[in-house]
Image (cartoon, helix red, strand yellow):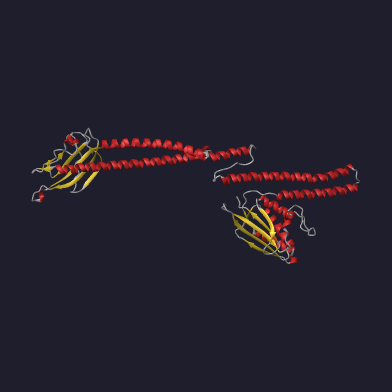
């Protein structure tokens, strides 16, 4: 049982679709063939009934009765087969008259037990004929009851009889057999043709997936850096996500390489100082002080680079992170730090807004921007969020802004202040890396950071715009 399940799970997409399409095709053609067969059979039987009925009416138009109520058939029957024994077409009449049969029924007993009221018609069959009959096995039977007016004054002299017409069922069975052979032959040919068309269509429709698989193999082997387009519209979300994942992983690797390279480069100088002091045969106190200073410096360098590596980049496919709770927690702490200045932070948060990323990145963004706003604000800070519809995307992006009523930032100073280690005012305490960290995080999420003047508060406004999550 497990082996069968495993085998079924290994079926290719083409095999699965071909199997499903084939089952649907055979079911459709089978039902179509059955419906056509039934329709043809019912139509043939209906035509036979009308033909037998027309034979009966033709007899009515030409027959007569003697004074002894003996039926006199027309000189020429409606079909020559009525005069040929064993022809397969028979007529008979029974009732108040002596029983009558056509010449074709001589020596062929027929089921004549049925008696009908005047005006009643019956069509039935195929009926089994008596076993002693050698030439006919089954017949179709049309019967009609009538009153024959002999023209006498006394209505009791009218003749009540049931007129019967029989036809051998072999003729109709042969017609149906010919039709069925033709029908199932054509449907079988159509099934083979449609199967061939399905195989061709499936191969053509699955070519994009095969091409994506070949491109993935080239990416794994290092022959290509990403999946090359164009791809069908249905595959674009998949190939786009794969390319984004590949790019994200490569950026992570590149960032880690750069961080390690920066760490190694930064440690070269303290190590070189230690080596130089050892080579200079410095006294113990001086060497101790140098070692302590350089160790402290290296510790700061390592801590900084590790923190930088931990903050860098982001991973794809995050659950949406609510913003309000994190913002309130940060603002409570900042209001305590800056309680002496009486700064008030206001919120204008869209309840639908969500940050699709690492909670730590959200804290870094809010923490650095809000701390910067508290640091420069006179009285008011404003944090606002809203969702932004993006043309061509089913999801919305996120706009997050932090504003203050401080002195603001001149447009020509924006690029310089976003550089690592640059501070707007050397007299204000800080390290000058907060805004650079914000810019790095925003860039990692394919977002955009803009700095301008707040139209409401008059100070600086930092706007973070993130594209819709993939």
Number of labels in the image equals: 0
What residue is rendered at 46% in x and 40% in y?
A: 21
- Front-lying residue, 348 or 118: 348
- Front-lying residue, 416 or 313: 416
Give x and y (percent) for residue 112: 19, 41
Give x and y (percent) for residue 336: 73, 63
- Front-lying residue, 146 or 353: 353
What residue is rendered at 68% in x and 60% in y?
A: 402
- Residue 464 visible in the current orientation: yes
Q: Is residue 1 left or right of residue 286?
A: left
Give x and y (percent) for residue 269: 82, 45
Query: Vertical placement of 200 versus 452: above or below?
Result: above
Query: Vertical placement of 26 versus 307: above or below?
Result: above
Q: Is residue 199 left or right of residue 366?
A: left
Query: Vertical placement of 345 versus 128: above or below?
Result: below
Q: Is residue 286 left or right of residue 81?
A: right
- Residue 322 visible in the current orientation: no
Q: Residue furthest front?
A: 412
- Front-lying residue, 116 or 412: 412
What residue is rendered at 88% in x and 43% in y?
A: 278
Within the image, what quadrant is residue 252 found in? Answer: top right
Give x and y (percent) for residue 301: 78, 49
């Amino acid at each position: 049982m497990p082996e069968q399940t495993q085998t079924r799970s290994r079926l290719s997409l083409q095999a699965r679709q071909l199997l499903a399409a084939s089952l649907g095709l055979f079911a459709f053609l089978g039902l179509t063939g059955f419906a056509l067969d039934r329709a043809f059979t019912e139509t043939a039987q209906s035509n036979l009934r009308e033909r037998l009925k027309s034979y009966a009416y033709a007899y009515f138009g030409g027959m007569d009765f003697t004074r002894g109520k003996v039926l006199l058939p027309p000189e020429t029957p409606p079909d020559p087969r009525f005069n040929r024994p064993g022809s397969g077409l028979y007529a008979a009449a029974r009732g108040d008259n002596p029983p009558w049969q056509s010449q074709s029924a001589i020596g062929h007993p027929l089921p004549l037990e049925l008696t009908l009221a005047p005006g009643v018609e019956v069509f039935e069959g195929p009926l089994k004929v008596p076993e002693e009959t050698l030439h006919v096995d089954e017949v179709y039977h049309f019967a009609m009851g009538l009153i024959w007016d002999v023209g006498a004054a006394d209505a009791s002299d009218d003749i009540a009889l049931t007129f019967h017409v029989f036809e051998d069922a072999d003729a109709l069975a042969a017609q149906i057999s010919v039709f069925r052979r033709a029908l199932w032959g054509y449907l079988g040919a159509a099934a083979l043709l449609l199967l061939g068309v399905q195989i061709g269509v499936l191969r053509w429709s699955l070519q994009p997936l095969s091409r994506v698989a070949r491109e993935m193999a080239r990416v794994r082997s290092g022959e290509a850096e990403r999946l090359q387009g164009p791809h069908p519209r249905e595959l674009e979300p998949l190939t786009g996500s794969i390319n984004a994942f590949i790019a994200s992983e490569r950026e992570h690797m590149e960032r880690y390489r750069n961080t390690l390279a920066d760490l190694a480069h930064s440690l070269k100088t303290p190590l070189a100082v230690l080596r130089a002091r050892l080579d200079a045969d410095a006294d113990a106190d001086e060497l101790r002080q140098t070692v302590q200073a350089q160790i402290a410096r290296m510790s700061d360098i390592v801590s900084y680079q590790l923190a930088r590596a931990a903050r860098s980049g982001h991973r794809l496919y995050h659950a949406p992170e609510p913003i309000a709770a994190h913002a309130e927690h940060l603002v409570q702490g900042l209001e305590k730090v800056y309680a002496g200045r009486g700064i008030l932070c206001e919120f204008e948060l869209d309840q639908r807004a969500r940050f699709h990323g690492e909670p730590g990145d959200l804290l870094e963004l809010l923490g650095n921007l809000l701390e910067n706003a508290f640091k420069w604000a006179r009285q008011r800070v404003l944090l606002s969020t809203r969702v932004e519809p993006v043309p061509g995307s089913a999801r919305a992006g996120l706009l997050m802004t932090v504003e203050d009523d401080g002195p603001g930032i001149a447009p020509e100073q924006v690029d310089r202040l976003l550089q690592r280690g640059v501070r707007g005012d050397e007299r204000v305490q800080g390290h000058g890396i907060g805004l650079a960290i914000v810019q790095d995080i925003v860039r990692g999420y394919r977002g955009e950071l803009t700095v301008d003047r707040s139209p409401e508060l008059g100070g600086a406004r930092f706007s973070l715009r993130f594209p819709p999550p993939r």
